[in-house]
Amino acid sequence: MSEITLQPAARHIGPILWQNVASGMTVAEVQSARSDVVVSSDSDVLPSGARCLLYIPDMSLASLNYFVLFHFLGDSLAQVTFKSSGGARFTDFRAVSLMLRAKYGTELSSREAADSLCAADWIAPNGVNISVQCNPILGSLSINYQTLLVTDAGKL
């Protein structure tokens, strides 16, 4: 009788979310890929239950400074979020949208209002969905990279 050896289940590394970090990477893998990340002491939790375990404290983009947050669901990277450190205006939303349009093409949806919430969404060729939200009244702008939309669409 031959002996059966069980192998641990292979981890799934998904598509690249942002730059060189992929959905499904562990904290150690993200730290290895990005020398500029630090361990987060913030308990930021998304509605999905994903927790911010790593972040980049300062990233400049389109005249704003951002925190780049790495949210993990369990041991797997689930979302990368650029979160402005304040002062975002409607013109910043337009500038970021223009950059994303140049990189990914026309957005799937967009709503703009200079005095209220603005939002736009893209799907990258690798299936990652990118969403931008800006609230000029609060001075906040965020850019989210995740695979949620594609994962949900796969259930149809």
Image: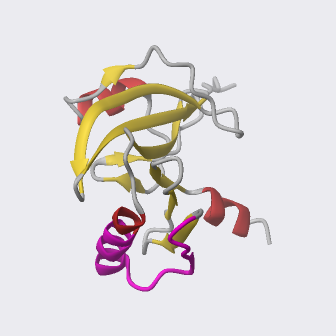
Question: Which quadrant would residue 100 be assigned to in this image?
Answer: bottom left
The colour style of the image is: secondary structure
| Residue in the picture at 62% in, 33% down | 50
Task: Give the residue displayed 47% in from the left and 47% down from the top.
Answer: 23
The quadrant of the image that shows the C terminus is bottom right
| Front residue of 127 and 110 | 110
| Residue 81 sits inside the magenta stretch | no
Q: How far across and how far down the image is residue 80, in percent? A: 44, 45
Locate residue 78, reporting x and y percent.
Answer: 54, 42
Residue sitting farthest toward the top: 41
- Which region is colored magenta? 94-115
Q: Is residue 56 above or below residue 21?
A: above
Q: Is residue 152 above or below residue 21?
A: below
x and y, in percent, of residue 132 in the image: 49, 61
Q: Nearer the viewer, residue 45 or 84?
A: 84
Answer with left or right where residue 43 lies relative to residue 88.
right
How many marks overall?
0
Left or right of residue 72, residue 19 in this image? left
Pick the front one: 138 or 126: 138
Q: Position of residue 102 (x, y in %)?
A: 29, 80
